[in-house]
Amino acid sequence: LAAILRVIPWKIPSMQELGLPPTLERLAMQDRGFILVTGPTGSGKSTTLAGMIDSINQNKKVHIVTIEDPIEFLHVDVKSSICQREIRTDTANFASALRAVLRQDPNVILVGEMRDPETIDIALKAAETGHLVMSTLHTTDVMRSVNRLIGVFEPDAQPTVRIRLADSLVGIVSQRLLPQADGKGRIVAVEVMMNTPSIQGCIREADKTYMIPHYLEEGRTQYGMQSFDQHLMDLYRVGKIALEVAKAAATRPSDFERTIMLESR
């Protein structure tokens, strides 16, 4: 007999307490569109989304509905009105719950996971009709997230999905948890993509999607975007993570190591 338990705090940590970049606050304050938080299992996606929902709750008078499997963090109304629904307890699945939620005049909808084409299709429709939709996906970086969202659809439907996603997406956040250099817990490394005109072009045209990592790094100053490797370098420079950890997690380890060597000269 064995068990794995996760301790979930009663108090929802703020995005600052979680060590998340300020760009995520800007994402949370959007009025409409589609936001994805992605990463492997156990990378803190639910915690990040809870922090974003809490930020909305603290700052905006809106109606928020969450659809979760299971409910992890309990939200208490502050400025917003929040209704939390649980799969199998309150509703059969994400797709049917999302259809029902759209009849309840929500401003913000959190969908626990984009599991199938039907759920993704309804989520995009919700974003297209003026709602802010937030969800998760089990992918390891931003570019894979775009490819996964589109790839679950039949080939003949993918061009239309690309256009819809390019038009409704606000941003994608991909994250990983890494051991801290002092051995006291883990720290989050984050890749952030905002839907700039250049990124829109990469999403619309399949032969340009591979250019997304380039635009992430180029758009750091102007748009607040960042690649994993840029954030890993930041964390290493301030002593938050060890060099071995940073290199192992880097998307391009050889380029990462070359930058370290140039800086040490």
Image: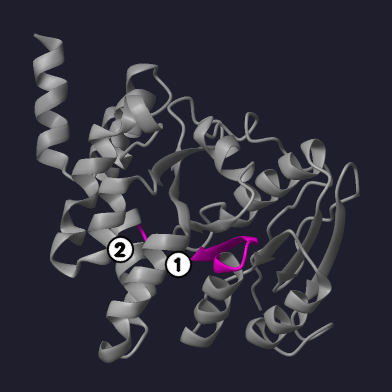
Front disc: 2 or 1: 2
Residue in the picture at 10% in, 20% down: 261
The residue identified by callout 1 is: 138
Question: On the image, which quarter does residue 263 sit in?
Answer: top left
Q: In this view, does 112 lie to the left or right of 64?
A: left
Looking at the image, is mark 2 or mark 1 earlier in the sequence?
1
> Disc 2 marks which amino acid?
Arg
Q: Name the residue under label 2.
A: 144
- Vertical order, 71 against 198 (above or below): below
Measure the C-alpha gap from mark 2 to mark 1: 10 Å
x and y percent of residue 85 in the render? 81, 73
Magenta segment boundaries in residue numbering? 128-141
Quadrant, the C terminus: top left
- Image quadrant of residue 52? top right
Q: Quadrant of residue 257?
A: top left
Q: Does the magenta stretch include residue 136?
A: yes
- Badge 2 marks a residue whose secondary structure is helix
- Where residue 198 appears, x then y in whole percent? 25, 47
* Residue 33 x %, y %: 55, 57
Q: Do callouts 2 and 1 mark residues in contact (Cβ within 8 Å)?
A: no
Packing grade of label 2 (10 A; few <14, some 14-19, many >=20) is: some
| Colour theme | one colour
Magenta highlight on residue 86: no
Between 22 and 2, the one lying in front of the other is: 22
Which residue is nearer to you in this view: 239 or 115? 115
Amino acid marked by disc 1: His
Q: In which quarter of the image is the N terminus?
A: bottom right
